[in-house]
Each structure stands twice: as structure tokens, then as C-alpha cells.
Image (spheres, rainbow, N blue to C red):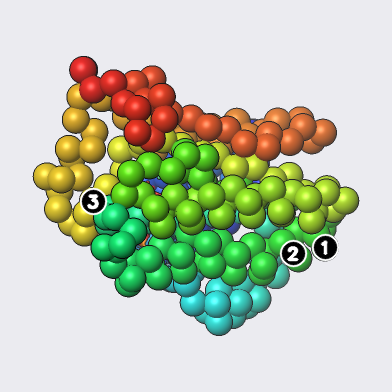
Amino acid sequence: MGLLSNKTAFITGATSGIGKACAEEFAKEGADLILSARRIEKLNEFAEILKKDFGIKVFSFKLDVRNYQDVKNSISSLPGEWKKIDILINNAGLARGLSKIYEGDVENWEEMIDTNIKGLLYVSRQILPLMIERQQGHVVNIGSTAGHYVYPNGNVYCATKHAVNALTQAIRIDTVDKNIHVTSVDPGMVHTNFSNVRYSGDTAKAEEVYKGIEPLTAEDIANTVLFCVTRPKHVNINEIIITPLQQASPAYVNRNK
Ligand SMILES: NC(=O)c1ccc[n+]([C@@H]2O[C@H](COP(=O)([O-])OP(=O)(O)OC[C@H]3O[C@@H](n4cnc5c(N)ncnc54)[C@H](OP(=O)(O)O)[C@@H]3O)[C@@H](O)[C@H]2O)c1
């Protein structure tokens, strides 16, 4: 028996980084998984590996969290047994670009706001009623230290993660009488594809971000999420801020490794 046997977890953005690591960690603990992301081939390949390696059930489907109709249709048409969702990990998200606000790229802003804020809202709007109906569930939002501090040129990304911080609190308040756990896991630097996306595929620039430090790994975050969802029923972890040892805040980093 794993820690999550008989549980079903829904993870957004499960093709890479933190979402993928959470899927692996949860699979090891016996959870059945509903996995979504836009790169469906990659997602399906990963789902097959998890089924084979861990003997769990996996339902995977293509989803762009920015499209409300798709979010609504795909969740409402989940087969009955897959609607018993115990854990939702709102992970899909990104940073795009770094620039002064007066020089910012509006398309980048739209992409971050649509994914990080609206996507999280769309998915939560569909899954929370399923949890409330069963009077149980755990929502884990992947926030960021950028939801607590603003750093130079991070303006809109930081604003989206401040919004995630506010929404986590709002969901907790609105569901306090519904037996729902609500947690935010807020990492600093994690070595994933994140910086590559931020710099639109400029890998040299992306690697510079981690120069001289030992960043967190996606597995570090997955372990933290696992900890949050495996506490006794009467316990709710509100938020965890987790950074590399060498990072005191987004802008204060000791690069001497
Ligand atoms: N890495 C860090 O330093 C760091 C720090 C703090 C917080 N975070 C947060 O952690 C979360 C995961 O990021 P990561 O570091 O794991 O980055 P990543 O390796 O780039 O993974 C991002 C995941 O999100 C998915 N995604 C992006 N846009 C999507 C959309 N519109 N619809 C559905 N899925 C989408 C991607 O899948 P597809 O491309 O296949 O759709 C991918 O699986 C994000 O919310 C990020 O803000 C990361």
C-alpha cells in the first residue's frame, strides 16, 4: 500500500518539470492519475511508462488551460470513475520574457495572465464542485516566491503569482465549510524547462540563471507537494515557500558554487 493508494490526482502541465515530477512521485505512492498538457504525444508516452512501471491507472488528455470551453468540456466529459478527484495540482504555468514594464511585450503578458491566473481559475471552477459534492479534496496551487516578492523586470509574472497567492487564500476561505484542503507550494529557483520557456528557447541564457548555484530540482517540489497531501485529515498546510539554500529571495542569490 502506497501513501496515495485509492486516491486520484489531477495534474495540469504534466509533460515537464514540476508537474511531471509530481506525477512520478504520486505514481510511486499508488495514486491513479489524470494528466493534462498541450503536448499530447509526450504526455501519452509518459502515461504509458507510469502505467507500466507503477501499475496505476492513468487518464491523459490534451488540454490548454487557457481555453475555458475545452477545460469545461473535457472535465465534464470525464468518465464517471475519473470524476472522483481527490487531489488537484494546479501546476501549468510559465514566465515569458523579462523586461521593464514600459517596454514589455503585451503578447507575453496575455500568455502569462491567461495561463497562470485564468487557467488556474478555469480548472478550479470545474473541479471544485466535484470535490464539494463528495465533501473531500485537496487543491494544491503551484505558486512562486514571485507571489511574495517582486523582482526587477519580473513585473507581470510576479503579478500573476501574487494573484495565485490571493486565489489560494480565496479558495480556502470559500471552501472552509466544505472539508476541502487548500495549499500553495511556492518555489524559488527550480531547474526545469522554466527558464528555457522564459527566454523562448535561448538555452545559453536559460542556463545562466542557475550559474553558481545549486537550484532546487522538480523532485524537491514533488516531495514537498507529497508531504502537504499526506498530512492527517485535520491538518491544512496553507503555504510552503521553498528555495535553494543559496537563494534568500528572488533577487538575493549567493552565486559562488
Ligand atoms: N522552475 C521554477 O524556477 C519555478 C519557480 C516557481 C514556480 N514555478 C511554477 O511551477 C509551475 C511549473 O513550471 P516548471 O518549472 O515545471 O516549468 P516547465 O518545465 O516549463 O513545465 C511547465 C508545464 O506547464 C505546461 N503548460 C504551459 N502552458 C500550458 C497551457 N497553456 N496549458 C496546459 N499546460 C501548460 C507545460 O506543458 P505543455 O507545454 O505540454 O502544455 C509543462 O508541462 C509553473 O506554474 C511555474 O510558474 C516554477
| Label 3 Cα neighbours within 10 Å, binned few <14 / some 14-19 / many ≥20 | some
Q: Residue at x 44, y 50 (%)?
A: 158
Q: Which residue is mark 3?
A: 196
Which of the labelled discs sits on residue 133, or is there none? 1
Q: Residue at x 39, y 53 (%)?
A: 155
User: Measured from the top left, where is residue 200 in percent x and y?
Assistant: 21, 59
Q: Which residue is mark 2?
A: 130
Mark 3 residue CB less than 8 A from any atom of ligand 1: yes
Mark 2 residue CB less than 8 A from any atom of ligand 1: no
Tell me whether circle 1 and circle 2 mark residues in contact (CB < 8 Å). Answer: yes
When asked about the image quadrant of residue 152, the answer is: top left
206 sits to left or right of 184: left
Q: Nearer the viewer, residue 11 or 168?
A: 168
| Label 2 Cα neighbours within 10 Å, binned few <14 / some 14-19 / many ≥20 | some
**Rendered-image quadrant of the C terminus:** top left
Q: First in sequence: mark 3 or mark 2?
A: 2
Mark 1 residue CB less than 8 A from any atom of ligand 1: no
Q: Nearer the viewer, residue 57 or 207?
A: 207
Residue type, mark 3 in image = Asn
Residue type, mark 2 in image = Leu
125 sits to left or right of 58: right
Q: Nearer the viewer, residue 8 or 209?
A: 209
Q: Residue at x 80, y 54 (%)?
A: 175
